[in-house]
Image (cartoon, rainbow, N blue to C red):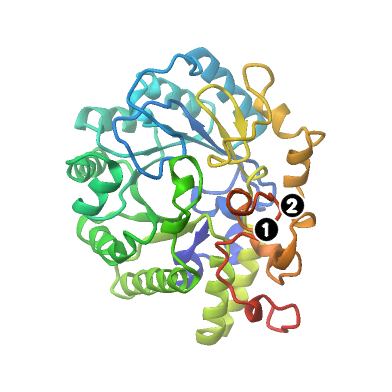
């Protein structure tokens, strides 16, 4: 996760994170990515059921009941363990988490245990009443997925009217006083929608947006050919930076992040090196705090059936099940070969990643994407768009 607005617009300084000792238990949510202990933010897919049919769904969600989901009591045991372990955030996802009847009870329990509770949703089921309930229990944030304006979004979501209903969900959250933001997955078919997303942020006074690079997993595993090529990815990141700066300069700043391609960090730094070298030095310090990809360390996933994964996309390799062992025990068991290597992944990446001068701030980028394309977990991430010249070791600009 790369904070474009934090880095490029200078809304965060290295001293902001140092003030809290870079301790995840003390850091405010907008600084969590700079923690030094990297206690995992955990994505819990509370259900596989969903009312939509998104073409890039990593969970292969369907609108049918599933009988293998963790019970309410098992969910609370998971939350107890995560709270004791020091995980700062519980992200309730799916499927569509709003389809799970006990979601408010589970989210409220996480808040009671001192965790930040957030949900990732398509927004179509957030009625005014449900929004008020989520506010009452202390939910920190609602991330609503939109992949463009009405025509594009509804095509991706597999349901006519999904865009309109999502906008209603956003409005209902705003009226209830809940912080709400957008989630957008970039690909060939919707990259031209990015400026429209920024206009939507402006028009609806939405404070936050996350732009996700495409990950080849779940129903998205067959979408490699729909990903942007390297030149188009660079252009998209430049566009996101430019739009972020535009809103900042007209006095309507938004929190803008990119997710799932840690080449974005060095790319922002290299651009600032030309435009504002003094700020570039501060950005480099923040990127070192961030450490790049943290699958298997700073982010993890628990599936609806209790299986533990390195992240929400890496669903074909389980480290264990919380029904049998606590998450904390599974997560710290480095005798498991892959888990042990993920804790120190920079030692194991190969090819251009191994000799890249950005390895300490990128972390080798997304391993599941490398595996999807090459069959090798430790091969270079094919979505890295930095040139050989930009990753060369002989530069003195670090």
Label pair 1/2, CB-CB below 8 angstroms: yes
What number is the disc on residue 345? Answer: 2
What number is the disc on residue 363? Answer: 1
When asked about the image quadrant of residue 232, the answer is: bottom left
Q: Residue at x 57, y 79 (%)?
A: 270
Secondary structure beneath disc 1?
Answer: loop
Q: Residues within 10 Å of mark 1 (few under 14, many from 20)?
A: many
Q: Position of residue 281 (x, y in %)?
A: 62, 77
When asked about the image quadrant of residue 142, the answer is: top left
When asked about the image quadrant of residue 85, the answer is: top right
Q: Position of residue 52 (x, y in %)?
A: 29, 35
User: Which of the two labelled residues, at mark 1 and mark 2, occupies the earlier sequence position?
Assistant: 2
Residue 300 in the figure: left or right of residue 58:
right
Q: Position of residue 14 (x, y in %)?
A: 60, 65
Residue 31 to residue 329: above or below: below
Examine the rendering and report whether any part of residue 18 can be seen. Answer: no
Q: Residue at x 63, y 54 (%)?
A: 374
**In the foreground, 203 or 384:** 384
């Amino acid at each position: 996760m790369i904070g474009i607005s934090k880095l490029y617009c200078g809304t965060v300084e290295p001293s902001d994170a140092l003030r809290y000792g870079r301790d995840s238990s003390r850091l405010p949510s907008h600084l969590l990515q700079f923690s030094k202990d990297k206690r995992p933010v955990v994505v819990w897919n509370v259900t596989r059921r969903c009312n939509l049919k998104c073409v890039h769904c990593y969970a292969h969600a369907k609108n049918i009941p599933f009988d293998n989901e963790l019970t309410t009591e098992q969910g609370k045991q998971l939350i107890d363990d995560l709270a004791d372990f020091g995980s700062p955030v519980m992200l309730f996802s799916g499927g569509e988490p709003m389809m799970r009847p006990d979601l408010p009870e589970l989210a409220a329990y996480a808040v009671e245990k001192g965790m930040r509770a957030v949900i990732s949703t398509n927004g179509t089921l957030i009625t005014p009443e449900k929004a008020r309930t989520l506010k009452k229990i202390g939910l920190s944030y609602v991330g609503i997925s939109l992949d463009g304006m009405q025509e594009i979004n509804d095509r991706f979501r597999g349901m006519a009217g999904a865009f309109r209903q999502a906008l209603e969900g956003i409005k209902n959250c705003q009226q209830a006083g809940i912080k709400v933001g957008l989630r957008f997955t970039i690909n060939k078919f919707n990259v031209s929608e990015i400026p429209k997303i920024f206009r939507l942020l402006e028009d609806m006074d939405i404070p936050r947006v996350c732009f996700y690079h495409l990950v080849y997993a779940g129903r998205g595993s067959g979408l490699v050919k729909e990903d942007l090529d390297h030149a188009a990815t660079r252009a998209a990141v430049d566009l996101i930076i430019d739009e972020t700066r535009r809103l900042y300069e007209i006095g309507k700043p938004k929190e803008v992040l990119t997710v799932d391609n840690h080449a974005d960090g060095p790319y922002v730094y290299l651009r600032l090196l030309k435009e504002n070298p003094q700020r570039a030095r501060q950005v480099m310090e923040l990127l070192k705090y961030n450490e790049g990809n943290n699958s298997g360390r700073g982010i993890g996933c628990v599936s609806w059936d209790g299986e533990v994964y390195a992240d929400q996309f890496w669903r074909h390799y389980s480290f264990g099940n919380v029904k049998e062992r606590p998450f904390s025990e599974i997560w710290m068991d480095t005798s498991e070969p892959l888990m042990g290597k993920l804790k120190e992944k920079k030692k194991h990446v190969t090819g251009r990643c191994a000799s890249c001068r950005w390895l300490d701030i990128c972390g080798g980028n997304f391993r599941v994407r490398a595996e999807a394309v090459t069959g090798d977990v430790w091969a270079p991430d094919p979505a890295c768009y930095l040139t050989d010249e930009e990753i060369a070791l002989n530069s003195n600009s670090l």
